[in-house]
Image (cartoon, rainbow, N blue to C red):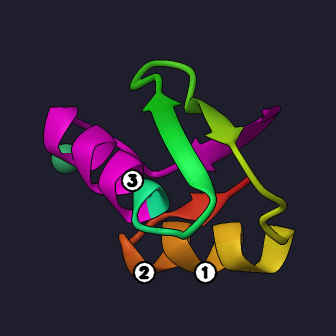
């Protein structure tokens, strides 16, 4: 298990948080994603290596950006 922390900008409510978490968890290899609405800090737990590019793409697909 690898853990990674990213900072997501643009989230303004709990559905934003959900969208980010779901989009990340959709990636093969990501087991858990927990985003904090106030700080944007998003903790990702991975069972296999996921590239930063894939993570960035998932966040952007949900409609947000990585700081
Ligand atoms: Cu929202």
Residue 66 among those drawn in magenta: no
The answer to whether the residue labelled 2 contacts the one labelled 1, judged by CB atoms less than 8 Å apart, is: yes
Q: Residue at x 64, y 38 (%)?
A: 44
Residue 21 among those drawn in magenta: yes
Q: Is residue 43 above or below residue 21?
A: above
Q: For the residue labelled by badge 3, is the local secondary structure a helix, a strand or a loop?
A: helix
Disc 3 residue: CB within 8 Å of ligand 1: no
Numbered badge on residue 29: none
| Residue 63 drawn at (x, y percent) | 38, 72
Q: Which residue is mark 3?
A: 20
| Residue 23 drawn at (x, y percent) | 38, 64
**First in sequence: mark 2 vs mark 3:** 3
Looking at the rendering, the stretch of residues picked out in magenta corresponds to: 1-23
Q: Is residue 40 left or right of residue 46?
A: left
Q: For the residue labelled by badge 1, is the local secondary structure a helix, a strand or a loop?
A: helix
The answer to whether the residue labelled 2 contacts the one labelled 3, judged by CB atoms less than 8 Å apart, is: no
Numbered badge on residue 61: 2
Numbered badge on residue 57: 1
The answer to whether the residue labelled 1 contacts the one labelled 3, judged by CB atoms less than 8 Å apart, is: no
> How many C-alpha atoms fall within 10 Å of the one at disc 2: few (<14), some, or many (≥20)?
some
Q: Is residue 6 left or right of residue 63?
A: right
């Amino acid at each position: 298990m690898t853990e990674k922390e990213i900072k997501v900008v643009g989230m303004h409510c709990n559905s934003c948080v959900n969208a980010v978490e779901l989009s990340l968890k959709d990636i093969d290899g990501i087991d858990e994603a927990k985003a904090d609405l106030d700080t944007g800090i998003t903790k990702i737990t991975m069972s296999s290596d996921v590239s930063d590019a894939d993570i960035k793409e998932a966040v952007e697909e949900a409609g947000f950006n990585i700081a």
